Image: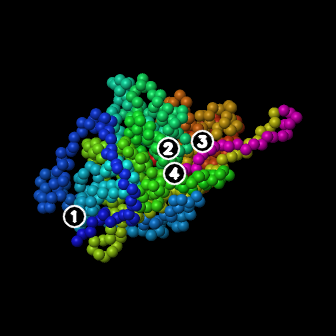
Amino acid sequence: MVVPRFKSFLGQEPKASPAIEQKPPLDLSHHLSRATKARQGNNIKEFYKYFAIPGIGNLAGGLPNASYFPYDTLQARVALPERFEPASSTSTTPPKPSESRIASKPFSRITVPRESPYSDPSDKIDIVTALQYSQASGYPPLLSFVRQFTRDNLHPNVPYKDGPEVILTNGALDGLSKALECLSNPWDKCRDWVSDREGILCEEFSFPSSIQMMRPRGLQIVPVKMDTEGMLAGGPGGLRDVLENWDIKKGKMPHLMYTITIGQNPTSGILSTERRKEIYSICTKYDIVIIEDDPYWHLQYPSAASSEASARNLAPPPPAPTTSSQKSSGFPFLDSLVPSYLSMDIDGRVVRLDTFSKSIAPGCRLGWITAQPKLVERLLRVTEGTTQAPSGFVQAMVAQVIMEPDNKDGKGGPTGWKVDGWVRWLEGLRGSYERRMQLMSTTLENGRFTIQQKRMANEEDAEWAVVKKAEMYSFSWPRGGMFLWLRYNFASHPLSGQVEGQRLAKALWIWLTKKPYLALVSPGEQFEVILGSAKPDGWRYSRICFGAVEEDDVEKVTARYTKGVESFWHLRKVKDIEGIEAWAASEQREQQVDVANLSGCWGC
């Protein structure tokens, strides 16, 4: 007898919560684009259900014969879930440093066979099925795993009846592309009326690749003010203010919101449950669909707030509120995380984008969308007419790593992670990135100030100098994600009265790439969602990534960066700035090597 591969994967049974009557999600079909409303099911895909009939002679499908696939197996050496040391979910102290190199850590081996002995499509991982044409929603075993993990563990408290559905994607950006295709109509200023232009709300600083995807569709990108948490619900420029004072001469009131709520890119904030409830209420009032992009959901750092307070001699922060009244995920680590908008989505207006990019590897190009079933059905139709399913190679390897049980032949051998191992892997990743965050933040904290001297102007006191401590930059210790958002205090620079701030900012960025500093950071203006703003503010900031360089180099490269900033603050002549600009325009710049990357890849 063949034991089903997936059914017994859960490490702990989720705790039950009192039964609450749930209502079906709202009908959001009025938000669908014209093209999406017109999409029909793929007639060819309708045949797939007949392929599973035992003994059927398939003369219908245009499927290449699997015996001609050149791969007999797919094999890999993979980490054990315990490879990285986790941090405590409640600890206010930094996690322990890593004790050994990856090369010396235990590993396992996985093999995707040519043909699996399992008959259930949800359990069957092999070359024959993975590399064949398949359903657009995703490879059945991986889709089954993701669906159950999403519903039972990641989002166990979705409040609408029957819960959400999922569909696999080619990563979060592909998910966003399909969500925009599904929920917005293209607009052309040369063809369409301004009154027909649709809009999308975003944080005032956001992920450039996502924003660049919206512009060609003609969507009006509407920035909403932020604080250290993320999007503001109230106050000037906050969500309520933007919507209450909407000018219809600019186009339709936005019906979409794009938001990064955990480890916000670039600001690293985490939106609290209280703020989410307030924003969700506003979205309900104005009938807005929330597109929640959360690639960093598992990278939440409980030690950040207390470490920041300790470093600055401030009172310890109050403990984070708990969600003990909600149904447990079955895992303390998952229960400790700030939950998604899905946890309060009584209307079914949340479309959540997830990815394996930050939990396995960006090159997987694999993710999933979670939303109410009717929206997922429409997203399926979009997928059938565009990308089809993600790469079979990738889906098979990811499924085998996460799902593989003991070998059926009874000889033992390698096993996959299963749900408890998958969660342990995520917990270890959180601990590793949290260590990096601590190293970078501590180094930046120690380098925030410089000593400035200024001679007295009158002759009598010319031998005396005024010495003051000047703050060069400020930042919040990252609460999540992979980045630190740093604001420069150019007003404290000796040349601030002679050289405009934006020019100083550009010169500083160039200065940092020169020897001996060789540190590359991302200019803040890259993340402004409005191009050519009348009052640009991004030039005051840099996004610094603690994930790109090796852990042993984080402190060293960050120290080079702080020394570079301090040396720039000691420049006192306008001709110094002119010299930097001239150097940047010369061929000398092309000869620089070993510039350390603190900017992070533009793909993230």
Q: Which residue is mark 2?
A: 275
Disc number at residue 487?
3
- Which residue is farthest right? 460
> At 34% from the left edge and 32% from the top edge, which residue is drawn?
186
Mark closer to the chain start, 4 or 1? 1
Mark closer to the chain start, 1 or 3? 1
- Name the amino acid type tagged 1: Ser
- Name the amino acid type tagged 3: Arg
Marks 1 and 3, how far apart in space?
58 Å
Region of the chain picked out in magenta, as a range: 458-481
- Name the amino acid type tagged 4: Gly
- Name the amino acid type tagged 2: Arg
Q: Which residue is mark 4?
A: 480
Mark closer to the chain start, 2 or 4? 2
Marks 3 and 4, how far apart in space?
18 Å
Marks 2 and 1, how far apart in space?
47 Å
Mark closer to the chain start, 3 or 2? 2
